[in-house]
Every structure is written in structure tokens, then in C-alpha cells.
Image: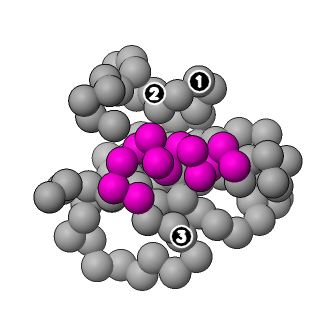
Amino acid sequence: MNDQVWLVGESNPKPDNYIAIFCIAAKNNKSRLGFSEYSTAREALARAKYLQVRYEAKQIRLFYPNSVSIIIKNGIQTHNGNISNSNI
């Protein structure tokens, strides 16, 4: 079982103009209302890219549990580089 899940905000991103992806601990029991949940980053990114086109959002932003957030340009990225395929 994965120890983390990926949540994608499903609502219109205006006025922030980005699609949000949150990486959270799977055991986190906070409400996930308004979010779709994915077990891999690849699935979450695919959904976020779809929503980006649908809502004409300028960016996709990834939020990590340690309060780091990044703007995604091409694929899932971290502050240390790209996540390897084995992790997504």
C-alpha cells in the first residue's frame, strides 16, 4: 500500500489560475471533498492537465506535505529534480 496519495482540486481555479495537486499521507483523515484522489503522481498529473485545458488555467502547482510547492512545467518535478518513474 502507498503511504501517500495525490489529490487534484476539481473546482474552477479562478482567480488563482492554477490547478492544485496535493501530495498527502494516505492515513490523513482530513476531508477530501472537492478533490479527486489518485495513488500515483502520473494519474494525478494526467487529471490536472485535463483540468488545466478545461479551465484554461495558466499553471499546475504541486504542494508537498513539508510546505514546499512547485510549479509544474513538464512532468512531475521536485526541488531536487524529476521524480523517477519508479516513484510515479
- Which comes sooner in the sequence, label 1 or label 3? 3
Residue 48: image location, x then y, percent: 61, 49
Q: Which mark is residue 74?
A: 1
At a point 36% along the width and 48% down the height, the residue shown is: 40
Q: Residues within 10 Å of mark 1 (few under 14, many from 20)?
A: few
At a point 49% along the width and 50% down the height, the residue shown is: 44
> Between 23 and 86, which is closer to the camera in this rendering?
86
Residue 78: image location, x then y, percent: 40, 28
Q: CA distance from mark 1 to mark 3?
A: 22 Å
> What type is the residue that disc 2 sits on?
Gln
Residue 7: image location, x then y, percent: 46, 60
> Between 67 and 8, which is closer to the camera in this rendering?
8
Q: Quadrant of the N terminus?
A: bottom left
Instruction: Quickly name the residue at label 2.
Output: 77
Q: Residues within 10 Å of mark 2 (few under 14, many from 20)?
A: some
> What type is the residue that disc 3 sits on?
Phe
Q: Are marks 2 and 3 in contact (CB under 8 Å)?
A: no
Instruction: Quickly name the residue at label 3.
Output: 35
Residue interval drawn in magenta: 38-50
At a point 66% along the width and 43% down the height, the residue shown is: 49
Q: From the viewer's perspective, tell me whether residue 68 is left or right of residue 49.
A: left
At a point 79% along the width and 40% down the height, the residue shown is: 58
Q: CA distance from mark 1 to mark 2?
A: 8 Å
